[in-house]
Amino acid sequence: MAFAPMGPEASFFAVVDQHRASLLAALRSGGGEPAGGGVRPASSSEVLASIENIIQDIITSLARNEAPAFTIDNRSSWENIKFEDSVGLQMVSHCTTRKIRSDSPKSVKNFALILKILSMIYKLVQSNTYATKRDIYYTDSQLFGNQTVVDNIINDVSCMLKVPRRSLHILSTSKGLIAGNLRYIEEDGTKVHCTCATAVAVPSNIQGIWNLITDAKFLLIVEKDATFQRLLDDNFCSKMSPCIMVTGKGVPDLNTRLLVKKLWDALHVPIFSLVDADPHGIEIMCIYKYGSMSMSFEAHNLTVPAIRWLGLLPSDIKRLNIPKDTLIPLTKRDQMKLDSILKRPYVTCQPFWRKEMEIMADSKMKAEIQALTFLSSDYLSRVYLPNKLKFGGWI
């Protein structure tokens, strides 16, 4: 199939193509793809049976004159997280747990809220209907207090039942955007034709999209919406065609992460990340690549360890002679975040990443991607990214 517009000559992508060949070779040798495991999609009958078993346990406890409690894997401790290069961060098989008790003043409300949401999930699955997290919050906003409470409980329930959120018939509104050389069909039959000129919203049902068609040479994950929009305005997508661009507008939501994972599984094209040269940007890149502690129970469905760091690298700041007055001193919070990342298990297998973070730590300075505009207003799209892609400037 042919997509317009035409990008650079085929020879421009020689190094990107070599990178893709090495990724495919790693997949064939079994070194780059997780070997199953993790949370798998569950049938409606399995979800209903799991909820019924939990309720049966509560009834049994009450019959014995005991206070019922929910037991949930503890996802806030690194002791319960293991790292595999081909998967990212995932739960250990025998991890410590925490109890949400019905007889404790500290947790009784949380116990009741979990029970309420389990009841709502049961009705959704039984009737084969779906609700968003926002819908659930607004069923009793005074009781829940805020949306974060609902979000955390849904993650806890998903972990407790060992099923992905989609299987609970709970959706989340997507905040991410996608543009470039891609067509697909949504579950309801809607045909989506992404273009280089304008972005479309990441679908809310990633599992349901099918018939993905693209000629893309690479996928670029852009940390911030402002940078993403600037690249669209500069016609970067057209000039580097065929390619795909995605942004999660900061910390990515679940749907944006699921989409990046789906594109990788379906297309196996190189995926590069463009983030600020600061601890927050690095953290966001790590979430796409290796996952997060809070969602570690669903790592196999979310992580893409093949992602490479394209920019902005701390070493680029000195190499490009970006003036000091465009840099920002690291705050105490930044330094704590950087120290935390440097201690994570995946940094040991990323010596080039460690070196870049050490450059940042030594300089005590950070830089936003916008710092490149000092060199010229379109330096990012006209010089920086094309050169990085042409000459393999990723780590």
Image (tube, rainbow, N blue to C red):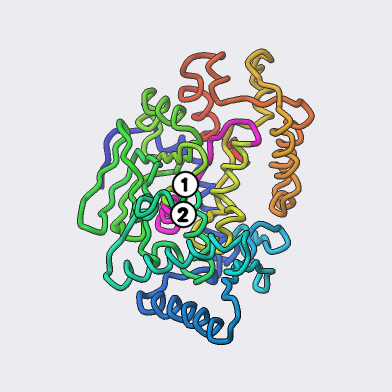
Q: Is residue 276 left or right of residue 47?
A: right
Helix, strand or loop at mark 1: loop
Position of 234 relative to 389 (above/below): above
| Residue range highlighted in magenta | 258-279
Q: Which mark is residue 236?
A: none
Q: Amino acid at mark 2?
A: Val
- Work out whether residue 146 or residue 246 is closer to the camera in this orientation and state it: 146
Residue at image x 60%, y 71%? Answer: 71
Position of 65 relative to 19 (above/below): below
Does the rendering let one see residue 33?
A: no
Q: Amino acid at mark 1?
A: Asn
Residue 266 lies in the magenta stretch: yes
Position of 346 relative to 15 (above/below): below
- Work out whether residue 188 or residue 34 is closer to the camera in this orientation and state it: 188
- Residue 292 x, y percent position in the rendering: 59, 53
Compute the Cα span from label 1 to label 2.
Answer: 7 Å
Kindly indicate whether the residue at mark 2 contacts the one at mark 1 (C-beta within 8 angstroms): yes
- Residue 184 x, y percent position in the rendering: 28, 52
| Residue carrying label 1 | 146
| Residue carrying label 2 | 150
